[in-house]
């Protein structure tokens, strides 16, 4: 279950590896929100995921092993709210969900304190001024860790040097004009770009990069390696950090263990998958 498309690159990377690890055929049922972090949409998918497992898992002693994989902290948290027994693996996320139970484990991409520092360093690298502001892409419908990162960053940034662009759970609302940030108070457009880490952005590198180019923003820093080939013009672009497909690949090893022995959930620790550099 993922806020991106069920055919996202991260989902395909996971599926390829779990198929390679498992010797028997898996009943594979991907659920994607097609680019939204809306809690109502994700909550409906979470219920579908649980219902799907329950309808096919059977009852002891003939119960078929099953695992629900969630992409992103909001998705994992909503799945947890629907089941305390089915094993859940968070494939990626900003942090461990606050409601994580004994049936959940997985991976997060940064501890929040590290992510705050990284975003501040990226802001410093962009060196914005009141006449050369930075556009900051953000999603207010993402998890609390993401909101804490933005709050920390806005307190750190110099007033009138930034333009926070909130997509409110729907990346389709992102436009070049919103990134430019021109209004009566700010007659000069933003000249640089950065984004707050978000699972919804993982498979939308090309779309986001195209909007940045359409806005004629010459300088940008991105958190994932997937962005490195997203631009027709590489000048002024920096890419830091991890590759999401590899992070989802790590989750496949956990799922493989759980399908072989569902009782091993307690031996699979929460881990920080990667650290941005």
Image (tube, grey):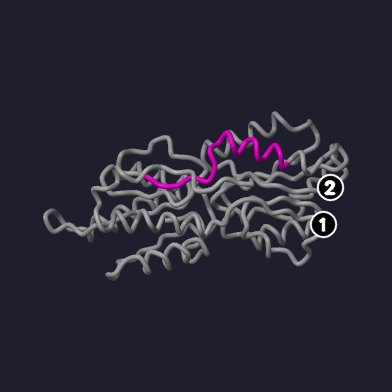
Q: Residue 94's x, y, as percent?
A: 52, 43
Q: Which of 95 and 272 lies nearest the eye of the viewer?
A: 272
Specify whether 242 is left or right of 255: right
Q: Given the current orientation, which residue lies at the most extreme left position?
A: 61
Give the answer, above or below, for where 120 lies relative to 21: above
- Quadrant position of residue 235: bottom right
The residue that appears at 41% across and 65% down in the rendered structure is: 17
Q: Which residues are magenta?
A: 105-122
Q: Residue 120's x, y, as percent?
A: 70, 37
| Mark 1 in CB contact with mark 2 (< 8 angstroms) | yes
Specify whether 84 is left or right of 136: left
| Label 1 SS | loop
Q: How crowded is the residue under tag 2: few (<14 C-alpha within 10 Å), some, or many (20+)?
A: many
Specify whether 261 is left or right of 21: left
| Label 2 SS | loop
- Quadrant position of residue 145: top right
Residue 163 bears which disc, if any?
A: none
| Magenta stretch encompasses residue 111 | yes
Label 2 belongs to which residue? Answer: 189
Disc 1 and disc 2: Cα gap in Å?
Answer: 9 Å
Look at the image and tell me in which quarter the N terminus lies. bottom left
Q: Main secondary structure of the magenta part?
A: helix
Label 1 belongs to which residue? Answer: 216
Which is more N-terminal, label 2 or label 1? 2
Q: Which of 212 and 124 lies nearest the eye of the viewer?
A: 124
Q: Residue 220's x, y, as percent?
A: 75, 51
Give the answer, above or below, for where 181 lies relative to 1: above
Q: Which of 178 and 144 lies nearest the eye of the viewer?
A: 144
Q: Which of 81 and 155 lies nearest the eye of the viewer?
A: 155
Give the answer, above or below, for where 207 lies relative to 140: below
| Magenta stretch encompasses residue 21 | no
Q: Residue 18's x, y, as percent?
A: 38, 64
């Amino acid at each position: 279950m993922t806020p991106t498309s069920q055919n996202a690159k991260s989902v395909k990377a996971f599926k390829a590896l779990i198929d390679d690890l498992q010797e028997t055929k898996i009943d594979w049922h991907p659920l994607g929100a097609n680019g939204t972090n809306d809690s109502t949409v994700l909550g409906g998918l979470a219920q579908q995921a649980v219902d799907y497992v329950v309808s096919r898992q059977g009852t002891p002693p003939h119960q078929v092993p099953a695992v629900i994989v969630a992409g992103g902290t909001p998705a994992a948290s909503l799945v947890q709210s629907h089941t305390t027994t089915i094993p859940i693996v968070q494939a990626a996320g900003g942090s461990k969900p606050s409601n994580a139970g004994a049936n959940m484990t997985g991976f997060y991409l940064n501890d929040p304190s590290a992510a705050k520092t990284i975003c501040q360093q990226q802001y410093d690298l962009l060196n914005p001024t009141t006449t050369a502001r930075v556009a900051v892409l953000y999603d207010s419908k993402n998890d609390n860790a993401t909101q804490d990162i933005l709050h920390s960053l806005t307190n750190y940034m110099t007033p009138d040097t930034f333009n926070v662009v909130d997509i409110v759970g729907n990346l389709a609302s992102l436009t070049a004009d919103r990134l430019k940030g021109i209004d009566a108070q700010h007659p000069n457009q933003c000249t640089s770009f950065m984004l707050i880490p978000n699972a919804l952005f993982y498979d939308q590198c090309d779309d986001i990069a195209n909007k940045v180019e359409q806005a004629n923003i010459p300088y940008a820093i991105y958190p994932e390696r997937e962005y490195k080939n997203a631009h027709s013009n590489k000048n002024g672009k920096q890419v830091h950090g991890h590759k999401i497909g590899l992070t989802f690949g790590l989750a496949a090893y956990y799922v493989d263990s759980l399908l072989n022995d569902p009782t091993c959930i307690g031996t699979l620790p929460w881990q920080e998958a990667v650290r941005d550099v």
